[in-house]
Amino acid sequence: MVGARAVLSWLETFPGDTWQQRWESTPAATKHRRWYEQVREWARTIDKTPTVGSVQSGMLALIYVDALRPDLQWLVSNCSRFIRPAIQATRDPDGVGGG
């Protein structure tokens, strides 16, 4: 939850009406590698420094609950053994074609 809060707090500093719109307006949406450094740099300005792991886990949680949908290139560049099962469970639980 620490990482998810950090990501959401950081996203609040960007324009948009939804979390997705805010995500798309961040440099991290197109900076596929080491995107979490931007969240950590911002957090230092408010005297907090979440770990890399907590920010990455927070992002995974936000993807899992479908609050954010990074593009395919971002997902591929941020390989995690947890991303595919999370997306599959939330976006296509029955598999492609539904059964």
Image: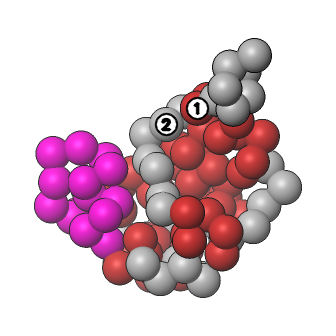
* Residue 40 seen from this side: no
In front of the other: 21 or 7: 21
In front of the other: 7 or 25: 25
Q: Secondary structure at mark 1?
A: helix
Q: Secondary structure at mark 2?
A: loop
Question: What residue is pinned by disc 1?
Answer: 91
**Mark 2 or mark 1, earlier in chain:** 2
Give, as a three-letter code, the residue at label 1. Arg
Whether pointer 2 and pointer 1 mark residues with C-beta atoms closer than 8 Å, the reply is: yes
Question: What residue is pinned by disc 2?
Answer: 66
State the residue lying farthest toward the front: 97
So how many labels did they put on this image?
Answer: 2
Based on the displayed image, in which of its 4 quarters is residue 22 positioned? Answer: bottom left
**In the image, is 93 to the left or to the right of 66?**
right
Q: Quadrant of the C terminus?
A: top right
The residue positioned 60% from the left and 83% from the top of the image is: 33
The residue positioned 25% from the left and 68% from the top of the image is: 25
Give, as a three-letter code, the residue at label 2. Asp
The crowding category of the residue bearing disc 2, from other C-alpha atoms within 10 Å (few below 14, some 14 to 19, many at least 20), is some
Q: Position of residue 82 (x, y in %)?
A: 79, 49
Q: Quadrant of the N terminus?
A: top right
Q: Position of residue 93 (x, y in %)?
A: 70, 24
Based on the displayed image, in which of its 4 quarters is residue 47 positioned? Answer: bottom left
In front of the other: 80 or 4: 80
Residues in magenta, as a range: 13-26
